[in-house]
Amino acid sequence: MTLIKSISGFRGTIGGKPGDTLSPLDIVKSVTAYATLRAEASKNYTRKIVVGRDARISGEMVSHIVCGTLLSMGFDVLNIGLASTPTTEIAVTMEKACGGIIITASHNPRQWNALKFLNEKGEFLKADEAAEIVRLANKGDFSYCDVDHIIPYSRSLDDGQNNKVLCLAEENRKKGSQTPYEYLEPLGRWEEFETVVNTTPSINRYKRNNLLNKDYQEKENDLEFRERNANDNSYIARYVKRYLEDAVDFSASSCAIKNRIQVRTGSLTDYLRHQWGLIKDRNESDRHHAQDAVVVACATQGMVQKLSKLSAIFENKDDFRRKKAEKLGHEEAEVWYKYIKQQIREPWSGFRTEVLASLEKVFVSRPPRKNATGSAHKDTIFSKSEKKGSLPIRYGMAEKENMFRLDVFRKENHFYIVPIYVVDLVDCKEFIDAPQPYEYVNGSFIKIDESFNFMFSLYKDDYVEITSKDECIKGYVNQYNAQSGQLYIGSVDNSPIFRIKTSTFLRDDNILLKIGDQEYIGKIGKFDNEKKQVVINGLKNNFMINALVKLNKKGDETKNIQTEKSYTKMSNEKKICLNVVDSIEKYQVDPLGRIAKVKKETRLPLTMIKKNRHKKGE
């Protein structure tokens, strides 16, 4: 294993420990040192570096590291891919770049690779320049680009991606709490900046508007655009705020708060959540909404103002440090700086523990979806000779779509479901009142008559409790498979609580594994076709299990992964067949999560259902 640093560049064998070989860490150090040196040359040339490589097997990997490092140093990268040394040299001059990097180890064996550095003329560096790169790389004292706000956060409280850019650390410190226009215009650099922004196609229009904003100060003073007491410029937030101010009577309140209705930004909620040790995982469950509600309720106006002041300090931290050092001394200034970076205290002692405990008791309330909307049939229309589809349409047949209601019946201790589709409202006379899957007697399917006892109608997100011989399933109705007679029930908070024994998985499915005496939950990861194994993410030591990719009838690979034996999948949805159900109970859930059992319902005729106009099937 070898690493050689010389005036001709950095070369060595790939793999091994940093410092002994041309490892990723050594590549980053050498490229960072080179970029630091070329920063001076970029003042007279474009801040662009050309990267070319030979066909060595490690070339692509090294190229990714080189390009990523250059981007992190604030350079534009022109990656020309496979190219000879003369081609890369010529590209530097043609593109008016400030330098170039050739990834090639020339005559050395295949396990070697190297970095050769060029100047703005497409020539190899002089001895003193190459020696400086070696010195800088050995020293390792580097400064990379910052990620910061275009419009200062202290003024906009906008923490979105369209208000963030990668920026040079020195320029960012000088910019401070100014907008790009306010900083660059007095320096005579605005027109050049404006041209670069307008000619860069990868910048979306929202970020471009922020970068080229010339009159932010005027908008900031416009209370309609930016109310400091509201802290949110979204239409919905402003609308709801004004609605509540008009609708709620505060005359009987003795509270002296001037602004009774206050709005908090998502960025403030995110900041406080992080400071108070709360984690938001949208994939874990829907209870994160309740967690955010607690954070918003505890976010005072004082915290809004404090966050704004802290943002202003961080945007000008070097100036603040210098002024404090002049006043207090260097050591006292460092203590002061560390102090302001401390967390905003919890609203009360034990806040985080109480919140997490309370979340476990939250019952997520969902309103049933009773609207009959959507298309009447699926797009594909079959010929009648194919004998597919159940809906006659345009000289053919199509499958019905958008099942919005399930009428549940009981007869002789068995449950039956009559699905109601959107198309059934178009022409009620064509509706067949029969439970599905169809049951046949003497060649004709059974229809609903007086012998069936109507229980209730189910809509999507109706809360039910279904009991069978083996289990009791509690959750919200997701859908019904009329062909197999299976009800799909989702967990109350959308968390993966249902245990399903299976050998078929998809990527990112939750899998329960027993290792020793302990049970662990991981996620199905990448399939290794050579080892015929699948990685289980979330477990230590790259845990893998034997598996195969399932094939369809044509022999093509599908997204399904077939494990060698059955495992337990943790799912947020459970299927249950009607023929094994002992009881189905429907409940009404109010907005606060209180439930009440539905004892009896009257079946609503199709003619009384409010329907929307449909794009298809009318």
Image (cartoon, rainbow, N blue to C red):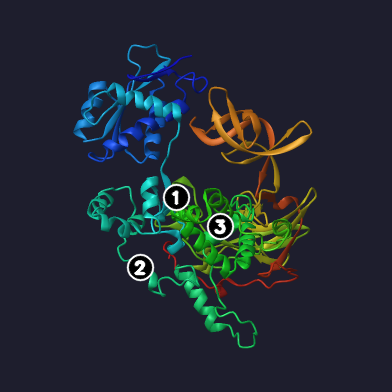
The residue at which mark 3 appears reads as 270
Q: Nearer the viewer, residue 268 or 142?
A: 142
Q: Is residue 348 left or right of residue 228?
A: right
The residue at which mark 1 appears reads as 384
Q: Which amino acid does label 2 sit on?
A: Gln
Query: Crowdedness of circle 3 by 10 Å Cα count: few (<14), some, many (20+)?
Result: some
Q: Do the residues under discs 3 and 2 have CB atoms within 8 angstroms?
A: no
Callout 1 secondary element = helix
| Whether residue 449 is situated above or below residue 467 in the rendered picture | below
Q: Is residue 182 left or right of residue 564?
A: left
**Mark number displayed over residue 217:** 2
Q: Classify residue 235 by image quadrant.
A: bottom left
Q: Classify residue 4 by image quadrant.
A: top left
Dot placed on the residue nearer the N-terminal end, 1 or 2: 2
Dot placed on the residue nearer the N-terminal end, 3 or 1: 3
Q: In this view, does 99 lie to the left or right of 229?
A: left
Q: In the image, residue 560 lies at what x, y percent? A: 56, 36
Q: Which residue is drawn at 36% across and 49% down?
A: 171
Query: Crowdedness of circle 2 by 10 Å Cα count: few (<14), some, many (20+)?
Result: few
Q: Residue at x 37, y 35 (%)?
A: 70
Separation of marks 3 and 2 at Cα, in angstroms: 26 Å
Q: Which of 40 and 530 is in front in this view?
A: 40
Q: What residue type is labelled 3?
A: Asp
Q: Residue at x 38, y 39 (%)?
A: 73
